[in-house]
Every structure is written in structure tokens, then in C-alpha cells.
Amino acid sequence: MDSSNTDTTSITSFTINSPTNNNPTPMMMVTSPTGSSSSSAAASSSPTTLSRYENQKRRDWNTFGQYLRNHRPPLTLSRCSGAHVLEFLRYLDQFGKTKVHTQLCPFYGHPNPPAPCPCPLRQAWGSLDALIGRLRAAYEENGGKPETNPFGARAVRLYLRDVRDSQAKARGISYEKKKRKRPPPNQGQSSSAPLPPSS
Ligand SMILES: [Zn+2]
């Protein structure tokens, strides 16, 4: 059930309620340049050829803008601080799909627990880290000054580091691709599990 390989995949699933990331929902795409839009064509390149990263960044930026609009009390981008970014990241955790065991859980430190447990699902560190990187870039591309970039705030960096360390401990992984799989010991021919005929 718990797909633990979603670490570095995109985080789009919190924006839309569908679990499929590859659904190309063009939210702010310009579909036809012949529309009678205003003459402020800021697009220096065709928006239809944006890379996956650029599309993702745009979606993330829209999501964050939506979050600001729904924020109570109202919050504008110019008044957004690192603390608000942390609030946003914690808010995203409710859409997470990564099981993070508490220290009280018997599976604490197990990457592949053999049974379900009531520990919470969170956003994987890799997802958050990539998200912050995209939002940080988007902020400055949208006119924000680097020195006031809330996504580059020290508190955010520290938070991400903390999430990485605690998730690594909770899941017993070191965030390095583990290559080898230990095959089960193959001693003695057990007749209980016959191999299918290979012919
Ligand atoms: Zn657990």
C-alpha cells in the first residue's frame, strides 16, 4: 500500500486531488496566441515548450499563491516570511504519502515494515526539498528580491535538514540509493514452493 519510492517524485498530488501526477492539466497555459489578450506579452518563449521542471515550478507557484489567498488572516507575498513557508510545508504533510514512524513505533527504523501501524503519513523530504528549490526560483522570477526570499530563509533550511535526518532515522534509510537486495537464504530445497516451469 505504502509506495515508498515516491521520495523524489513531484509533489503535484497535493494541488489536485487526483493521485496521478502525469495528468497534464493546463492551469494557466496559453492555448492560442490569437486570443485578444492585452499587449503585455511577457512570454519571451513559447509557453507550450516549457520543460517538465518549468511546468512543475509554475504549478507549485500557483499552489503557493492559492495557499496565500486562503490564508487566515490574509497574507500577501510581500509579507511572507520563512515562518509562513514552514507553515505551508506542515500544511502539505496532510497530503503526504510517506509513512514516518514515531520513536514509539516498533517499526521505527525499518524501511519496509511487515505490518501496518498508525504512524502518520508525511511529505517525503526529497519532495519538500525539491519543492522549496522550485518555489525559491519562482519567487525571484516573479520579481522577488533574493535577500527577502522566504524560501531561502535559514529557518527553512534548518527545517528541511531536520526533516531529512528524522525521516532517515525513522525509516532506516540513508538517502543513498541502495542497490543490492539480499536474497533470502536458499539453503535446502523446500518442496513447498515449487518454481513454475520455465519452458
Ligand atoms: Zn509506525
Image (cartoon, rainbow, N blue to C red):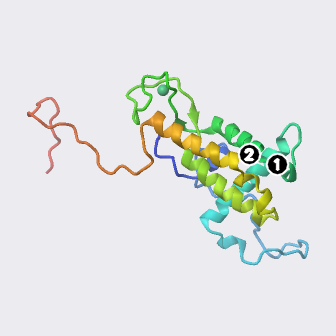
Q: Classify mark 2 as within 8 Å of ligand 1 or not, answering yes or no.
A: no
Disc 1 residue type (three-letter): Cys
From the viewer's side, name the closer residue of 134 and 65: 134
Given the current orientation, which residue lies at the most extreme left position? 188
Which residue is at 47% across, 36% downward? 169
Q: Is residue 124 visible?
A: no
Residue carrying label 2? 85
Q: Residue at x 64, y 49 (%)?
A: 157
Residue pointed to by mark 1: 80
Relative placement, left or right, of 92 versus 98 is: right
Q: Is residue 168 left or right of residue 58?
A: left
Q: Are the residues tagged 1 and 2 within 8 Å (C-beta)?
A: yes
The quarter of the displayed image where residue 90 is located: top right
Q: Earlier in the sequence, mark 1 or mark 2?
A: 1
Instruction: Residue 22: give x, y in percent of width and height.
Output: 58, 55
Q: Residue at x 80, y 63 (%)?
A: 145
Percent coordinates x, y for residue 128 in the rendering: 61, 48
- Element type at mark 2: helix
Tell me: residue 191, above or below residue 81: above
Q: Is residue 187 above or below residue 105?
A: below
Of 53 and 100, the residue lying toward us: 100
The furthest residue to the right = 38
Task: Name the secondary structure under disc 1.
Answer: loop
Residue, x 72% and y 77% (percent of image)? Answer: 45
- What crowding class fits label 2: few (fewer than 14 Cα within 10 Å), some (14-19), or many (20 or more)? some
Q: Residue 153 appears at what percent x and percent y? A: 72, 51
Measure the C-alpha gap from mark 1 to mark 2: 8 Å
Total marks in image: 2
Please, what is the three-letter code of the amino acid marked with disc 2? Answer: Val
Give how far across and how far down residue 183 sits, in percent: 23, 41
